[in-house]
Amino acid sequence: MFLENLKTIAMQVGMLYLIAGVGFAADKAKIFSKDDARRVIDLLFNIILPIAIIHTFITMEYTAEHIRGIFIAFICAASTHILGITVAGLAFGKKYSPLERGIYRYATVLSNAAFLALPLAKSVVGNEGVFYCAVYVGVFNIIAFTYGIHEISGHKAKINFKKIILNPGSISVIIGIPLFLLQPKIPYFINYPMELVGGTNSPLAMIVFGTFLANADFKRMFLKKELYFTSFLRLVLIPLCVLFVFRLCGVKGDLLVSMTISASAPTATNTAMYASKYGNDASLGSEAAAQSSILSIITMPVIVALAYVI
């Protein structure tokens, strides 16, 4: 069973990275550049991803298991981030400058939940995977706009508490949960366009991800030992810890797989963007995200396959 699941998941991961290869090639051919990708990220984050999340909540069957799953997913997501914050704090201490350790801590704690975990959950689990991963994305946004910004700015940036709620990821979950609970009859002429727009999230996110890889400094990213350590924490230690703890606590099935996918995803692609925005080393942030993304091709299939068999 493990080898069969490993083969299936590796194929799904491989297909997503093939789509990323389109973005990589488009960037190298100067058809779709890094600047173009940044504008598409705004489109994805502000419009397409929220529509995809809301549509999943609308179409998800109302059951006691799914209601219970929402609460468990929230607890799992919060626990994963708390563990990550603890591990990052212990791993990257005062021997690093505030800005440098801010990059490493951000890269350790925050995964590419929206632009890689959601597409993979859609491919491996289906709509139920998106349903549970959407809750993880909501928690991710809370951590990113508080702990994440505080760390990556070298403790200089003030936390904007409005953004904890007033951001597209959180708003989409806040809208989606009542729609799921109320189960309104959505007219076809609204439901179908939402399905079409939401369906573009996975391919567009991976194409953008490919342009990000095309601009990474591959030589430098594999020379810095701290980046290997960061990738190990993000891709192996944290996901394995939460996988076994969640299973011991009785979490299983699609919920466990969905949480494992989110927890085992590589470093968030916005690490470089936030580093640039808050006066940190954008190159280092880019290298951390790129290295973990490449290594995740090996680690994610193994860890997600484990979630099916333990």
Image (cartoon, rainbow, N blue to C red):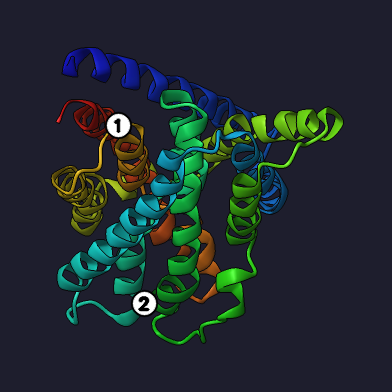
Mark 1 surroundings within 10 Å by alpha-carbon count, few (fewer than 14), some (14 through 19), many (20 or more): few
Which mark sits nearer the N-terminus, 1 or 2? 2
Amino acid under disc 2: Leu
Amino acid under disc 1: Gly
Residue 52: x %, y % from top left: 64, 40
Residue 240: x %, y % from top left: 17, 44
Mark 2 surroundings within 10 Å by alpha-carbon count, few (fewer than 14), some (14 through 19), many (20 or more): many
Q: Quadrant of residue 261?
A: top left
The label shown at residue 86 is: none
Of tags 1 and 2, the one toward the viewer is: 1
Secondary structure of the residue carrying tag 1 is helix
The label shown at residue 99 is: 2
Report whether 297 appears left or right of 211: left
Q: Outermost residue, right direction?
A: 189
Tell me if residue 108 can be seen: no
What residue does disc 1 label?
A: 253
| Number of marks drawn | 2
Identity of the residue drawn at 31% across and 37% down: 296
Q: Are marks 1 and 2 in contact (CB under 8 Å)?
A: no
Residue 258: x %, y % from top left: 37, 38
Identity of the residue drawn at 78% across and 36% down: 186
Q: Quadrant of residue 218?
A: top left
Identity of the residue drawn at 25% across and 19% down: 6
Please say if 42 is above or below 255.
Answer: below
Q: Nearer the viewer, residue 95 or 71?
A: 71
Tell me if residue 61 can be seen: yes
Quarter of the image where the N terminus is located: top left
Report whether 93 appears left or right of 152: left
Secondary structure of the residue carrying tag 2 is helix
Instruction: Find the distance from the CA under tag 1 to the CA under tag 2.
Output: 40 Å
